[in-house]
Image (spheres, rainbow, N blue to C red):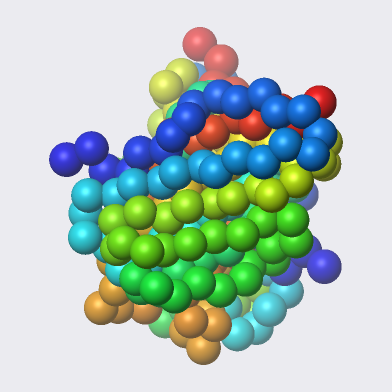
Amino acid sequence: NAGVTQTPKFRVLKTGQSMTLLCAQDMNHEYMYWYRQDPGMGLRLIHYSVGEGTTAKGEVPDGYNVSRLKKQNFLLGLESAAPSQTSVYFCASRRSGGLYNEQFFGPGTRLTVL
Amino acid sequence: DQQVKQNSPSLSVQEGRISILNCDYTNSMFDYFLWYKKYPAEGPTFLISISSIKDKNEDGRFTVFLNKSAKHLSLHIVPSQPGDSAVYFCAASAASGTYKYIFGTGTRLKVLA
């Protein structure tokens, strides 16, 4: 099992450009999450999904959109990138069927917006 | 408003000694807590968890203590090893809060050989 994978690993964008980050999981998990990690800020939830075709806003959703067209994939989109979106982005997934299940994280995508 | 706080950004400990990482929370609805470990250039990995019905949970060298009245939890690592050097995040969840975890800002642990 590959677990949670993220594509790409690194990306540099210019202000105003758009891009999509792809997260894939092969554990048949229902729940998927996108976080950003910034120095001194910990992990902050951007958007999450509790099942195929569903999405919801997290703590810091502005400037991002997501889609969950397939159960195994969760896409994070930046329509018009800003320097404030320079960060490390982590995707995570979790199985359903219990309130107390841990999340499994991908290796991260380091995004720089110039 | 930071609902989960880790007030020590860094901690250095000698190999073989005890490492104590602390975490405070403000939301009394939180009833499940987790600790994650993160190495550079990798995603966080689950370490240990505790439910609010317990005050202690052990897994090998790792023990998590929960003090609900103080809204405080701590992670003890005994004995500390150089391979434990990493950033540690605590996270909290509420049963009524559906499926979200709120993370702290992390503590960087350095275990000195």
**Residue A38 x, y percent position in the rendering:** 72, 40
> Nearest the camera: A90 or A70?
A70
Residue B73 in view (yes/no) = no
**Looking at this rendering, what residue extends furthest in the bottom direction?**
B96
**Looking at this rendering, what residue extends furthest in the top direction?**
B113
- B45 above or below B71? above
- B41 above or below A84? above
Q: Is residue B32 left or right of residue A61?
A: left
**Residue B57 x, y percent position in the rendering:** 37, 62
Residue B82 in view (yes/no) = yes
Q: Residue at x 56, y 74 (%)?
A: A56
- B72 above or below B77? below
Q: Residue at x 41, y 46 (%)?
A: A23
Which quadrant of the figure contains the N terminus of chain B? bottom right
**Residue A16 x, y percent position in the rendering:** 79, 39
Number of numbered tags placed on the structure image: 0
Q: Quadrant of residue A74?
A: bottom left
Q: Residue at x 35, y 39 (%)?
A: A5
**Residue B36 x, y percent position in the rendering:** 47, 47
> Nearest the camera: B80 or A35?
A35
Q: Residue at x 74, y 56 (%)?
A: A63
Q: Is residue B113 left or right of residue B107?
A: left
Q: Quadrant of residue A88?
A: top right
> Nearest the camera: B30 or A72?
A72
